[in-house]
Image: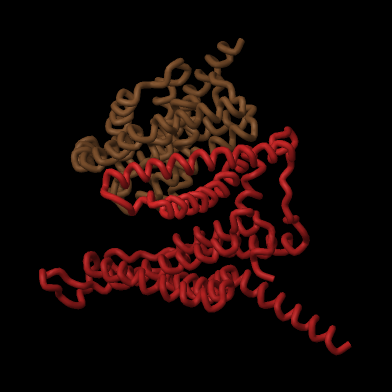
Chain colours: A red, B brown
Amino acid sequence: MKFDQYHPLINLLYFIFIFYMGIHFEHPIYVAVTFLSSFVYNIGLRGKKGLYINIGIMILLSIYYIYFVSFHHFGITPIAQTIVDNSFTLESIVYGGIKYLILCASCMWFSCFLYVFSSDKVMYIFGKVIPKLSLFITIFLRMFTKLKATSKKVLQAQEGIGKGIKHGNIYTRLIHFKRMVSIVLVWFFDDCIQSSKSMCSRGYTLKNRTQFSIYRFDNRDRIFVVYVTSLITVQCIALLLDQVSISYNPIIIWNKITIVSYLFYFGYLLFTLLPLLLQWKNNIKFSRLKFKKMYI
Amino acid sequence: MQKKSNVVSVICFQLLTLILLIVCQSLSLNFYVTSTLLILYAIGSFFISFERRKLEAREIVVLAVLCAIATAGRVIFQVIPFVSFLVGFVIITGVSFGPHAGFFCGAMSALLSNFSCGQGPWTPWQMFAFGLAGYIAGAMYFKKKDKPNKKVLTMVSFIIVFMIVGPILDVSAMFVIDAEMIFDLSEYKLLLASGLIANLIHALSVSFCIYFLADPMFEKLDRIRLKYGMVDTHEI
């Protein structure tokens, strides 16, 4: 029971807030929480593959960190000198690290988002607003893969009779290419219009066409909405009390950490880990049910 | 009656554009946000008119096929810098199915090909520029009895890409380079000069596509019209 079993609107709402908070909150504790939870959640969703994706993202983006530190020299506490008499400063190194973590986290969140938000969910959300356009996009996505398959077939057949694009000099290659394109187009057009006729007979363009979907808004979704909105309210209070903002440029300045601010950090941790916790809870519940069924 | 409602809708469109500009001015939004809002407004109003039109399934399918071909024309040549056949196929669509179909094909194939070429702040600008190329070609040649001469169409498409599509895309390049996202005329001139070679290669590739593929494409589209009874003067 993963997060992608919930209603698509809820997925969208949750991820919008996650992206907004993850990108705009530059407080180091918040950034650390975002990074850790995105790391764990991607593994929780994808298993071992998620771990590889995370490590790949971190290695790739470390190039950005090196670039940032070696070309930004703001701040007032110098640490070392470069060859051209610029100074590495504490502030720029810390800020580069924060930016690096934010970028990594948002990439990992995006990887989770792609796992949860498949194309049929996109069709479900936007299909009611733009019915013809969504039908068009659905057809397009099918056509594009079909075009690839058709052109592969034609290419193989043409190579078999010695008229592929790798035969002859440049001029004959061009002629072969043009020949191939024309064959693909004729075959493809006729094929597609045939399938459009069968679409017509199933009533695709009738006036009150409804879209079939398996999603429904049940109690589980309502409970999730209550949780999420209450946690977002806590973060709004934190935003109003200036607990999430921090200044890096001349000196690092942040507000005092009090007991209440730990509450905000804990709330943010809960918010980012909420889908994973629900996933674990459901897993435990289902394994217990299985256990009961086995021994009764 | 039809003409009267057209005039009213055009006036409403202009008034709404003016209101949008005034609102952006009063909120003191920067240039990029304002211009992108304007472009999204133009494209959105076009798509609303697409929703309202009565379309048959095969017309949607033909449009989808043309979009798929145009997208393939960009994705295949992704490896070679600045070369893409997308606008060529968009112009062919515009000439044979009318300006609206041209705009639609250009905008949608720009959006959908960017899923493999990379989305970014340039996406609405590309949608608008490629769509405009299709619209202009359609407005020039659709509803004429003879199909346009191959050489003339090649010249026209070269001019469209080099003079209209290229400069529009250069504006979006400015927002990618400049973090402050302010429109600066002297900077724009510099960008135009540095983007000259890119625009030239793009225009040459498009006119190459038109020169070699326009006639066979027209032939095939005409054949499909005859075979499946899609009326000549009927706009998609």
Q: Quadrant of the C terminus of chain A?
A: bottom right
Along the viewing direction, whichever of A256 and B236 lies nearer the viewer: B236
Say which residue appears at 48% left-offset and 64% top-offset. Answer: A22
Q: Is residue B26 in view?
A: no
Would you place residue B73 above or below residue B223 in this image?
A: below
Residue A38 as seen in the image, left or right of residue B126: right
Q: Position of residue B123 (x, y in %)?
A: 42, 44
Residue with the most extreme left position: A84
Q: Position of residue A174 (x, y in %)?
A: 32, 44
Q: Quadrant of the N terminus of chain A?
A: bottom right
Say which residue appears at 50% left-offset and 60% top-offset. Answer: A19
Would you place residue B18 above or below residue A190 in this image?
A: above
Say which residue appears at 45% left-offset and 70% top-offset. Answer: A31
Say which residue appears at 45% left-offset and 65% top-offset. Answer: A107
Along the viewing direction, whichever of A161 and A116 lies nearer the viewer: A161
Would you place residue A285 above or below residue A31 in this image?
A: below
The image quadrant of residue B51 is top right
The image quadrant of residue A59 is bottom left
